[in-house]
Structure formats: structure tokens, C-alpha cells
Amino acid sequence: MANYKPMTADEAAKLSLRPDGIYAFEVLNASAATSREKGYDMIALELGFFDSDGDRFSVKSWLVHSDSRWSEKTFFDFAATTGLGPQYAAGTMCSEDCLGRSGFAVIGTEKGKKKDNSDDCFPDKNKVKYFTTKKPEPSVSRPEPTDAQLANHAPANAPKPGVENLDEDVPF
């Protein structure tokens, strides 16, 4: 019998599609590659994103140098959000420069494509729509507390009863 750790329903739900929006990412893997159809130089990326719960999910993306100005804009935007603008402008940006970089991207949903020789489709998946320097909006709006709630609670910076003020002796 195989030894495995069963997945819970909560774990399975976290592997589902994330809502469309702006997410922070980190480059987990980057490698030089060549596009299959036209032989264009490109960088294949695996990006680690963080959802509103702080959980990581990954999405693959490709930066392709081609005749298309839109493809080149993707390269430009990626360089801008990750701080690689000078390397991009100098024409020296490579896959090694991308490793460990972080930035922001707009994630969308791509409909699942039809499977070969079948009427079935692959499941929908998240994809990078474009890279951006715009940070995501806070996902949770917090209502202002009512007067009654404020009356029943000490201020956030008030010392807790029975706990000495540990910051008193800090010289800065």
C-alpha cells in the first residue's frame, strides 16, 4: 500500500482558482528558452504568488522577445515591477537576473482548453494577464468601531494589565 498524506477539503479548495486581481509574486524559477513555433528567445518563469490569506500558489509565465510590441511590453513591465529596468534598457536582462525578484502582476482566469481527441476540457487556470507596479488594494475593509465597542475596549496602545512595559528601557 502506498504511503501518502490525504488532502483535506480546505487544502483542495486552496488549490482552486484564485479570484482575478493584483497579486504580489516572487520569481521561483527562471530559465532561458526558445519558443516552439517561431524560435523566439524567451524567459520561462515560475512565479510564486501570495493570496489574501498569505498562502502561496504558483503560475507559469513567459517573457518572449518577438516582433510583437505587446510581447516586448510584457518584458518591459516585468522589468519595471521587479527593479530590472536598467538591465532591460541595457539589453542585458537574462533569466539569472530574474531569480528571487519580486513584484506585482494582474492574475486572470484562462478557460480550460479542449483535450485532444475528446469533448472534455482541461480545468480553468489562473494566468498572468500583465505585470504592473500598482500594489493590490487591501482585500478586507474594516468597519469603524461603534462608540459602544470603543467603550468596552482599552486603546490598542494601552499596556495590558499585569504586563510591564517592555519598551520603557529601549534607548531609541
Image (tube, grey):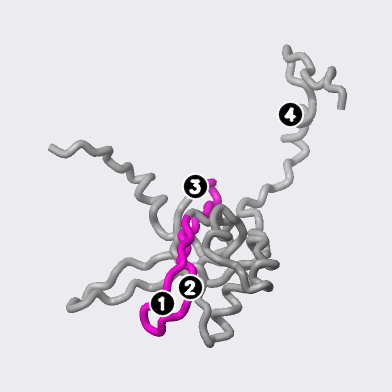
User: The N terminus lies in which quarter of the figure?
Assistant: top left
Mark 4 crowd level (few <14, some 14–19, many ≥20, 10 Å Cα): few
Question: How far apart are the two marked residues, 3 and 1, measured between alpha carbons?
Answer: 31 Å
| Label whose residue precedes the other's in the sequence (3 or 1) | 1
Q: Residue furthest bottom?
A: 67
Do callouts 4 and 2 mark residues in contact (Cβ within 8 Å)?
no
Question: How far apart are the two marked residues, 4 and 2, measured between alpha carbons?
Answer: 57 Å
Residue 35: which numbered mark, if any? 1
Q: Secondary structure at mark 1?
A: loop
User: The C terminus lies in which quarter of the figure?
Assistant: top right
What's under tag 1, amino acid-wise?
A: Ser
Q: Residue furthest left?
A: 1
Q: Nearer the viewer, mark 1 or mark 4?
A: 1
Residue 42: which numbered mark, if any? 2
Do callouts 1 and 4 mark residues in contact (Cβ within 8 Å)?
no
Residue appearing at x 56%, y 56% in the figure: 25
Residue 9: which numbered mark, if any? none
Residue appearing at x 52%, y 78% in the figure: 65
Q: Which portion, as a residue range, is magenta?
A: 29-55
Do callouts 2 and 1 mark residues in contact (Cβ within 8 Å)?
yes
Residue appearing at x 49%, y 61% in the figure: 19
Q: Is residue 114 above or below residue 154?
A: below
Q: Where residue 141 sits: x, y (%)?
A: 66, 52
Do callouts 3 and 4 mark residues in contact (Cβ within 8 Å)?
no
Task: Identify the residue under disc 4.
Answer: 153
User: Residue 35 falls in which quadrant of the image?
Assistant: bottom left
Viewer-side residue, 91 vs 57? 91
| Residue 130 falls within the magenta-colored stretch | no
Residue 55: which numbered mark, if any? 3
- Judged left or right of residue 45, residue 12 is left
